[in-house]
Image: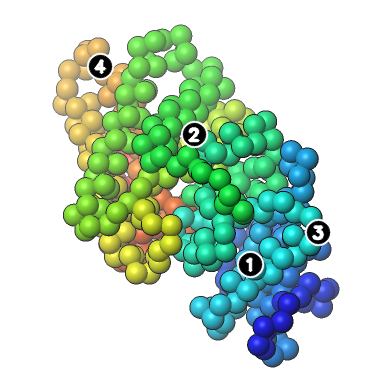
Amino acid sequence: MVEQNVIIRLATAKDKKTLSKIKNNAFPFLMRFFFSSSKDTLVAEKNGEVVGGAVLKIFNLKNKKCGHVLELFVSKKEQNNGLGKKLVQASLAHMKTIGCEEVFACVEGNNTGSSNIFSKNGFAVLSLYDQIKNYGFSYFKLLYNTFHIFDIGHFLWKFPANQKHFDSSAVQFLMSILLNIIVFLIACLRINNSIWTAPGELLYVSAAFSILFIVRFIFMITASKVQRIPVRFRLWESGITLNILIAGIFGGFFPVPGSIYPKQTEWRYPDLKKKLGIVGLSGIISTALVLSIFTLIQKFGNTDHPLNTFVAYNILIGKNLLFFNVLIPIFPLGCYDSRRVFDNSKLLWAVLALICAFLIFLI
């Protein structure tokens, strides 16, 4: 594929070192441990210099040959010059040539540079409902082949977007509460916690998750409306999948609350960074507020009250949510609220982190 002075071609062994250097500059440090290689790797060459690439993976799903744009990257000096678009178009052409009927890509929710490119080239986000409905038991094979298991906060995009998708914010929000409750109970089962034989405690756990998630949602929606940003809720389905594995194998758990995103399909994170920072701040404040209230109830309330177990579950889950939502604003937890605050003010994030660390570890 040739366009002006840019050539898109299959990579050779000689390109490996240059591609690694570009990827190291394009992705966060920790992502370097997850880099992949493939014989179906394309490179973008400009004036004889390799300036970008796309790592593709080919697999079979429900008797169809499918493709996955595993990595898409462009050197910093060539970003915003349309090379990403050219690489995606060349990737689609290459995979069509070798018989792929469907193509997938996973993009972090705030990575609008990539998501806008995929949207403009005929991709659409598949909700968890669509993934299960379309692929049935092959859903797990889809997750494995697209690596959509460990990429918390990433969404699965599909080409061609030739059908109506079920993408309800309300349903995804309710599913986020329900799935987090289920994963928590799986973790309890794994460590032989007696909660499964105590109907009252099951109710307390469900209520605790509902309170924390609903209050956070209300705060974030209110912040969005005040700033006049049309938004929607998205479930982080890959975080749920990873959580199930951790709960089933180790008996561990971490909250995966999902988040608020602009409603339009195509938007630019830099343009809305400040407003989304306020939305993220509201999410953190809401969790800290709920945790503080229940901590005070536990500290000054009647120690013999029958609802003490309910209070304890709110504190336990609230501390977990606050920890992941505040203290690690980088990959692989860059989808939580702290990242949006961190991107606007590292000082503000540091102050919040100190306050929340006090609530989590010292109270």
Find out whether the residues at labels 2 and 3 contact each other: C-beta distance under 8 Å: no
- Quarter of the image holding residue 312? top left
Badge 4: few (under 14), some or many (20 or more) residues near its Cα, within 10 Å?
some
Q: How far apart are marks 1 and 2 (CA)?
A: 37 Å
Residue type marked 3: Ile
Dot 2: what SS?
loop
Residue at 35% in and 12% down: 200
Residue type marked 4: Leu
Question: Badge 4 is on which residue?
Answer: 307
Residue at 17% in and 22% down: 301
Apparent side of residue 138 relative to residue 255 in the rendered image (left or right) = right
Find out whether the residues at labels 3 and 1 contact each other: C-beta distance under 8 Å: no
Looking at the image, is mark 3 or mark 4 earlier in the sequence? 3
- Whether 86 is drawn above or below 33: the answer is below
**Front position among marks 2 and 3:** 3
Which numbered tag is attached to residue 63? none
Looking at the image, is mark 4 or mark 2 earlier in the sequence? 2
Residue type marked 1: Val
Question: Badge 2 is on which residue?
Answer: 253
Name the quadrant of the C terminus. Answer: top left
Residue 304 position in % (x across, y down) = 22, 13
Dot 1: what SS?
helix
Dot 3: what SS?
loop
Colour treatment of the image: rainbow
Apparent side of residue 165 relative to residue 208 in the rendered image (left or right) = right
Residue at 35% in and 43% down: 322
Question: Badge 3 is on which residue?
Answer: 98
